[in-house]
Image: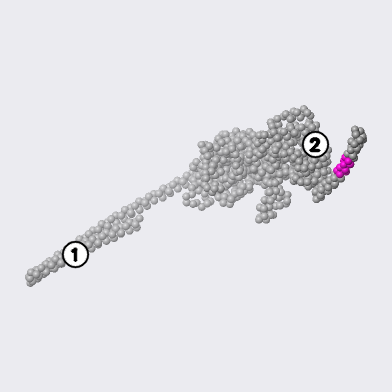
Amino acid sequence: MRENWFKFWNHPRAKAVRHWSNITYDVSWNIILFLIIGVLLVGSFSVGAAGGYFASLVKDTKAPQLTEMKQQVNSYAITSQIYWGSGEKLTNISTDEERQPVDIKEISPYLLDAVLSTEDVDFYEHDGVVPKATLRAVLQELTNSASRTGGSTLTQQLIKNQILTNEVSFERKAKEIILALRLENAMTKDEILQAYLNVVSFGRNSLGRNIAGIEAASRGVFNKPAKKLTLPQAAFLAGIPKNPYYYTPYLQGGVIKKDLTPSTNRMKTVLKRMYVAQNITKAQYEKAIKYDITKDFAKTSTRSRETYPYVYDLAEKESLRIMTSYFMKKDGVKEDEVKPSELAEVKANYQDQALVAIRQGGYKIHLTLDKKIHEAMQTPAKNAANFPSTLQYKQVVDPKTKKTVNKKDPEETAAVLIQNETGRILGFVGGRYTDGAADDFNRAFQAKRQIGSTAKPILVYSNGIENGLITPASTINDEEYYYQTVPRQPGDNPINNEGGRYRGNVTIREALELSLNVPAVKTYEKMNMANSIQKLVDMGIEIPDNIRYAPSAALGTMEITPVELAGAYATLANYGEYVKPYIISKITKDGKNIYKAKSKKKRIYEDRTAYLTLDMMRGVFDKGTAQYANSLLKVPGDWAGKTGTTNEIKDSYLVGSTPGVTLAVWTGHDQNNSLFGATTYYQRTQNVWAQMANLTYNANSSYFKSGARFNQPASVSANDFKNTGRFKEEDKKKKEAEAKKKAAEEKKKQAEAEAKKKADAAKADDAKQQADDAKAKADADAKRKADDAKAKADADAKRKADDAKAKADADAKRKADDAKAKADADAKRKADDAKAKADDAAKKAAEAKAKAEAEAKKKANEDKKNTE
């Protein structure tokens, strides 16, 4: 370059020009040399300063152990899953973010190339950090550049997501670089890439849930495993982590976005980078870029929680209980060793730990439910035609407003199907899904209701047989009867049968087939009721103390859930051995069993007792109260069962067993209204039961053992079918004689009562006559006395008048005419006095008469009262 300058400056056209050219050249050259030296000095200083600054940022960063780093980057929440007992996946346990880890070998090569071409094209060449890219990112940050190309490798992104935070700072970036370099020494490239793909966020899936990891993304967006992704699908998913919720095709709720242009443009960008990186050919690129990816999106899905709400809630509840016990046992904590005052808090803490584990621990919860059977059972429950169309209502108090309101109270149903031998619950119905949705109340497991006559086989007749009190052939009189073991109160009604009539002498077999109440109570009162109840307690059924000694328990006044009732009947079908019904068969993690159910049997009844009871229950279907169900039943087999109804027809049951399974069905109202409708209540119950039996048999008949029968055990003898029990009532003739004697005594009592009534009437008539006579005599005496008094008064008055007149005449003679006048005046005065006295006498006579009449009347009333 120096020679070229010389040639240029040495051939000027003038000497002056050459002079000034030389000067310019020298100055310019010196300036350039100065600038070069200055840049080198500044660069050296900057590098030193940057190095010092970087060292200051990471001085407190402790280098973790390589094994610890590997564990940290592979530590993430894994969604737990629920599986049907028949093997199909049911759903994921609800969590903030769904993730399903996958091995890199199970990921489509298209996806691996797409991610590397987009996020880190030199992934397999660098040592965790690309200095050039990091410097570019730092300069963009310092200059606040609008264009940010990013400088993080996949290793750095993994460090940021799993070990550090998303904080934007040079300190975090410096730590990220140091740890990324170290991670490259702890893991292979494939392990790092696999961890990254299992960690990174992919937005939302077709359920609207947050998803992380490529397997969850592939299944959630395209409904296929990651290993089956096509080129366009792989490119689409690889573009999402750039801005997950911007590029994801789904909104909340799993609704597909109306405008997918940003997402499809991002896919095209990924395809372009794959082509530039020579991971795909031009033909592949051109074909993929024209592909309509939107047709591959999974349709908006319904969450299994909404499709199988009762199953999901029960699975989560039961798994939580199991895992709580698991963690307590793992820590050596025993409930009986914890202070009662501290037990609730201790269990709550372990329950919180179990809840986190279930939702984020990657557990697999395997149910006992057969999917086809369970779904078949829902069909009759959801069929509105099986229930009354007219709604009933119940007045309840609104907990919020405290006002009384009318609440809908539709007829509900619940059902449970159990495998007798194992206790596995194969299917259940938690409710009818009224208004198209389920509620939070699982009636099959939570509804404690009186069980009516379904108590008779498991409480009365089974215990009567076991105690040697009765045999199926024992006779008993079905008659008007009152409870004998409780004090009888005025107004108590006798025990009634449905239909209100009594059938006289019947066998125990007939009493069970026809569900007669009086024979059941009579039998139950002859036993130790508390010991009989204990059989139910031994099966895990809670019985209040007031029921233990109540004869009404024979008619099913205890409250039991449908699943408990099914378990009790399965005990009879299992020849007297009880197996607790269960719905979770096992819980696993990483292929290892954390929990596995064990069918531990408990002897409740002797096999003889169970068989004889089952033998009687066969007749319930053939000629008893379940004949209607039997007419609809299309399932072959040896069926034995019992119906049940509670007071005021508030509950209706049918429980039936084959050698393989037991099906229990209940219908009723949540608010305890009585069962009404166009069809008879028991027909509706038995219709639902028969439909469920038919549909579940068609779904999977292997559980029913329809070709088998309940085999008679060797402990059963010929005498068990004869009337050989200790409980024998009088024969019919003796009863009739007693009835006639009782009727004669009643008739005699009635005749005596009539005679007494007539005598009392005659006495009353005599008393009345005496009273009338006494009154008449009193009236006559009073009148006579009054007349005599008046006559005497009149005579005295006349005599006195005459005397006065005679004296006056004599005086008149002696006196003058003036004396005559005075005499006349005196006579007049005396006459007036006499008249007044006569009036007084008459008045006294009237008063005497009235007094006599009053006394006579008073005496008559007293006599009449004494007579009555």
Q: Position of residue 415 (x, y in %)?
A: 60, 40
Label 1: element kind: helix
Residue type at tag 2: Val
Residue type at tag 1: Ala
Q: What residue do we see at 67% from left, 53% from top?
A: 345
Left or right of 111, for residue 527: left
Foreground mark, 1 or 2?
A: 2
Which badge, 1 or 2, is on the more N-terminal residue? 2
Q: Position of residue 606 (x, y in %)?
A: 63, 45
Name the residue carrying label 2: 121
Q: What residue do we see at 80% from left, 46% from top?
A: 174
Foreground residue among 620 and 684 = 684
Q: Position of residue 419 (x, y in %)?
A: 65, 40
Q: Residues within 10 Å of mark 1 (few under 14, many from 20)?
A: few
Q: Position of residue 555 (x, y in %)?
A: 55, 45
Left or right of 606, for residue 69: right
Q: Quadrant of the N terminus?
A: top right
Name the residue carrying label 1: 836
Question: Would residue 801 be counted in the magenta stretch?
Answer: no
The quadrant where residue 94 appears: top right
Left or right of 795, for residue 611: right
Residue range corresponding to the magenta coloring: 27-40
Q: Quadrant of the C terminus?
A: bottom left
Foreground residue among 414 and 327 = 327
